[in-house]
Image: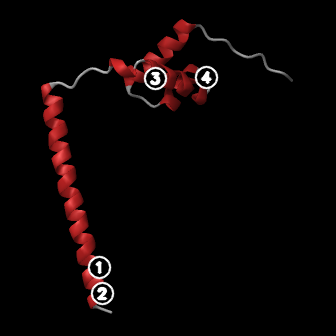
């Protein structure tokens, strides 16, 4: 009952990884489509990302603006959450 281990060419691996990177679809969906194990494809993608981490493209001006906007919104939401948490604690203490 031994199964022979499947071998994949480097070209096949590269194409599978490109499908994940370019499509934005989950590894699990692409692995299912290709008929390979999700963990195998995930490993290939992780290896590719480690090898290409320094090749990340710089952000465009619109992406930088959007990032600043999201960071500002994040700060505001954190302050609101903190305020509401303190208010809830205050009113809970008052009604005891």
Mark 3 crowd level (few <14, some 14–19, many ≥20, 10 Å Cα)? few
At a point 51% along the width and 22% down the height, the residue shown is: 47
Question: Which residue has dot 3 on it?
Answer: 50
Give the residue displayed 20% in from the left and 53% down from the top: 75
| Mark whose residue sits in front, 4 or 2 | 2
* Image quadrant assignment for residue 1: top right
CA gap between label 4 and label 1 equals 52 Å
Residue tagged by mark 1?
A: 89
Query: Given contact means CB atoms under 8 Å apart, are the residues at marks 4 and 3 in contact?
Result: no
Label 2, on which residue? 93
Whole-percent x and y of residue 32?
56, 27
- Mark 4, residues whose alpha carbon is within 10 Å: few (<14), some, or many (≥20)? some
Q: Indicate whether 81 appears above or below 18.
A: below
Secondary structure under tag 4 reads loop
Horizontal and vertical percent for residue 88? Answer: 27, 77
Name the residue that disc number 4 marks: 36
Disc 2 element: helix
Answer few, some or many: residues within 10 Å of disc 1's Cα (few below 14, many 20 plus, some between 14 and 19): few
């Amino acid at each position: 009952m031994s199964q022979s281990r499947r071998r994949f060419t480097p070209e096949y691996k590269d194409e599978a990884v490109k499908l994940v990177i370019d499509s934005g679809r989950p590894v699990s969906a692409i692995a299912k489509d290709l008929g390979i194990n999700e963990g195998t494809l995930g490993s290939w993608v992780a290896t590719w990302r480690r090898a290409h981490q320094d090749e990340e493209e710089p952000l465009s001006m619109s992406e930088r603006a959007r990032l600043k906007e999201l960071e500002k919104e994040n700060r505001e939401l954190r302050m609101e959450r903190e305020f509401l948490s303190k208010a809830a604690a205050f009113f809970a203490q008052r009604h005891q």
